[in-house]
Image (cartoon, grey):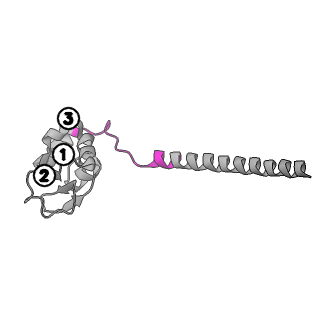
Amino acid sequence: MLALYCKTNFKMVYTASKKILWIGIVLSLAFLFWCSSQPQEDTSVVDIDKIAQCLWQKWVKMYGTETCSHCIDQKELFWDSFKYITYVDCAKDTDACAKLEGTPTWEFANWELLPGKQRISVLAEKAWCEVK
């Protein structure tokens, strides 16, 4: 009787383990599919230099700090073209950043503020820069 109980119990545990494994695989695949479907900035198509120069010409500013991870990510989207962006370091110019809720924040010529890390195409569209 004891041997029968152990065998049955082992079979139930084995079956439950298989179900959990399959659920884990399905969830992992769903997560990978979701990640791959998120919109990515295709920087190979756009001329980042032209957009960065256009943002400068349209008086667009980025407020940030050197230690803010989202600010660092935002700068890295522009690569070497970030040199054209008007950048205000909030750690050094606290008065200019007093109106902000957080960093990074973009300010446009009409004083509109756009908080958070933004895609280059979104910044170009808001500043009426041509994206090609």
* Residue at numbered disc 1: 66
Compare residues 30 and 131 and report the one nearer the observer.
30
Identify the residue under disc 3.
80
Task: Kindly indicate whether the residue at mark 3 contacts the one at mark 2 (C-beta within 8 angstroms).
Answer: no
Given residues 44 and 96, the one toward you in this image is 96
Q: Residues within 10 Å of mark 2 (few under 14, many from 20)?
A: few
**What number is the disc on residue 91?**
2
Range of magenta residues: 33-48
Percent coordinates x, y for residue 48 in the rendering: 23, 39
Report x, y in % for residue 109: 12, 58
x then y, percent, for residue 29: 57, 45
Kind of residue indicated by mark 2? Ala
Image point (85%, 47%), residue name: 7
The quadrant of the image that shows the C terminus is top left
Which residue is pictured at 78% across the width and 52% down the height? 12
Helix, strand or loop at mark 2: loop
Distance, label 2 to label 3, CA atoms, is 22 Å
Q: Secondary structure at mark 1?
A: loop
Q: Secondary structure beneath disc 3?
A: helix
Earlier sequence position, callout 2 versus callout 3: 3
Q: Are marks 2 and 1 in contact (CB under 8 Å)?
A: yes
Q: Is residue 40 left or right of residue 1?
A: left
Pick whichever, 59 or 106, lies toward us.
Answer: 106
Taking the image as shown, residue 112 lies to the left or right of residue 27, namely: left
In the image, what residue occupies the spot 34% across and 44% down?
41
Query: Residue 67 or 58: which is nearer the viewer?
Result: 67
